[in-house]
């Protein structure tokens, strides 16, 4: 067993163990779907950060940084603007005591709005969770190449379904704290090591085009709007955010967690982009640009740190995958089965 796979295996088994421990607290629908509305500010912050920082950040934003360089640091602006708006919505959402966003839609409009929201959410989130599975499978295949890509995806999918279904939001919230700490430590330690390995900015300049060091210019105005607007709109309407606000112990805790999330997302998204920018000088000839951090971690870091960083990448992906699995599952049970088929379901 190589050290990279060893780290990943221990991490995956730890997530399942945490989930089994959390399952002891599951007695009602509210326990499973919104953690019994019991989350503290720190735990809520961890699961909010872990949910938002996912494949789009570690692969999508990394791919953009690989192509345009340091100018990609504009990408977090949209997330941060959306989080600022969420601060004013979080307390009010918690006060409405919903379980799903569709609860709010029916309360404001009618049952048809609940059904339409359900259909949109299931289609969108099934798509999103599917590429989280693919990304996590790609990381497992990277550290264990003797496994086929398809087998890697199936194994990772089984783990995600297992730890999510065991205890729902309680599982994801507790795991989110582990994943959040892992993410922050991973990128904080790796960025300066990447920079050292690249020979600093001067060493990077011998490999990368001059445009990769320009803060303004490589991304046009229209391209910038195309990058920023979708993320801004997603975070405002993301059912995962609201399901977590519903899970907070109080309105004040929901708002406090969003403030902490603002700092966490600012750090994580900026650090990931800078890691990808520096790593692009270490791996200048990649065919799949989005995996630059993963390849650089495996090929250029000391084995122990490389294994930790690859585990960090897996944590980033899995944290979002579990959330985008729980939301449509809750939606099917709450907004279709219980609402229309069996209202007296236990």
Image (cartoon, rainbow, N blue to C red):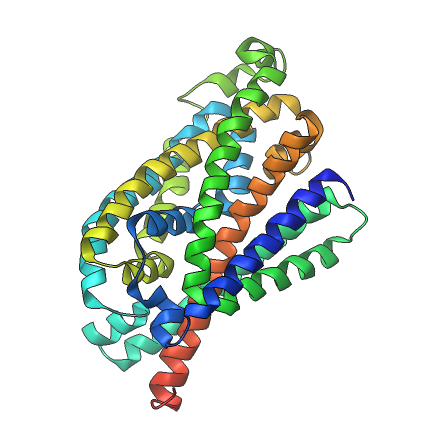
Is residue 218 toward the left or the right of residue 43 in the image?
right
> Which quadrant of the rendered structure holds the C terminus?
bottom left
Is residue 26 toward the left or the right of residue 276 in the image?
left
Relative to residue 106, is residue 303 depicted above or below?
A: above
Measured as percent of width and height from the top left, residue 77 is found at 34, 36
Is residue 238 toward the left or the right of residue 154 in the image?
left
Measured as percent of width and height from the top left, residue 173 is found at 41, 56
Measured as percent of width and height from the top left, residue 166 is found at 52, 68
Q: Residue furthest top?
A: 202
Residue at point 60%, 56% (across, down): 133
Relative to residue 159, is residue 314 depicted above or below?
A: above
Q: How many marks?
A: 0
Residue at point 43%, 48% (across, down): 177
Residue at point 65%, 36% (across, down): 307
Relative to residue 99, is residue 288 depicted above or below?
A: above
Measured as percent of width and height from the top left, residue 230 is found at 38, 48
> Which quadrant of the rendered structure holds the N terminus?
top right
Does the rendering let one see residue 63? yes
Closer to the camera in the image, 34 or 226: 34
């Amino acid at each position: 067993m190589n050290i990279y796979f060893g780290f990943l295996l221990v991490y995956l088994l730890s997530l399942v163990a945490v989930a089994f421990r959390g399952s002891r607290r599951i007695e009602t629908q509210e326990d499973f779907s919104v953690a019994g509305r019991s989350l503290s500010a720190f735990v809520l912050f961890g699961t909010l950060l872990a949910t938002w920082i996912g494949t789009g950040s570690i692969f999508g934003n990394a791919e953009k940084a690989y192509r345009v360089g340091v100018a990609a640091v504009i990408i977090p602006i949209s997330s941060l603007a959306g989080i600022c708006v969420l601060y004013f919505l979080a307390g009010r959402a918690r006060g409405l005591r919903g379980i799903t966003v569709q609860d709010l839609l029916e309360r404001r409009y009618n049952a048809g709005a609940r059904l339409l929201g359900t259909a949109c959410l299931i289609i969108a989130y099934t798509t999103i969770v599917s590429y989280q599975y693919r990304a996590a499978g790609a990381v497992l295949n990277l550290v264990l190449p003797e496994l086929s890509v398809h087998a890697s995806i199936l194994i990772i999918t089984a783990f995600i379904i297992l730890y999510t279904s065991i205890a729902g939001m309680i599982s994801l919230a507790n795991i989110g704290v582990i994943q959040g700490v892992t993410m922050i430590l991973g990128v904080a330690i790796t960025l300066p090591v990447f920079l050292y390995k690249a020979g600093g900015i001067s060493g990077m300049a011998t490999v990368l085009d001059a445009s990769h060091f320009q803060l303004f210019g490589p991304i046009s105005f229209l391209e910038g709007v195309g990058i920023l607007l979708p993320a801004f709109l997603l975070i405002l309407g993301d059912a995962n955010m609201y399901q977590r606000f519903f899970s907070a112990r109080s309105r004040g805790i929901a708002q406090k967690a969003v403030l902490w999330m603002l700092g966490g997302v600012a750090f994580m998204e900026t650090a990931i982009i800078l890691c990808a920018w520096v790593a692009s000088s270490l791996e200048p000839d990649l065919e799949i640009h989005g995996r630059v951090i993963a390849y650089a971690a495996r090929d250029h870091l000391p084995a122990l740190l490389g294994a930790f960083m690859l585990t960090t990448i897996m944590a980033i992906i899995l944290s979002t995958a579990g959330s985008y699995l729980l939301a449509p599952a809750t939606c099917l049970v709450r907004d279709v089965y219980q609402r229309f088929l069996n209202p007296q379901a236990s």
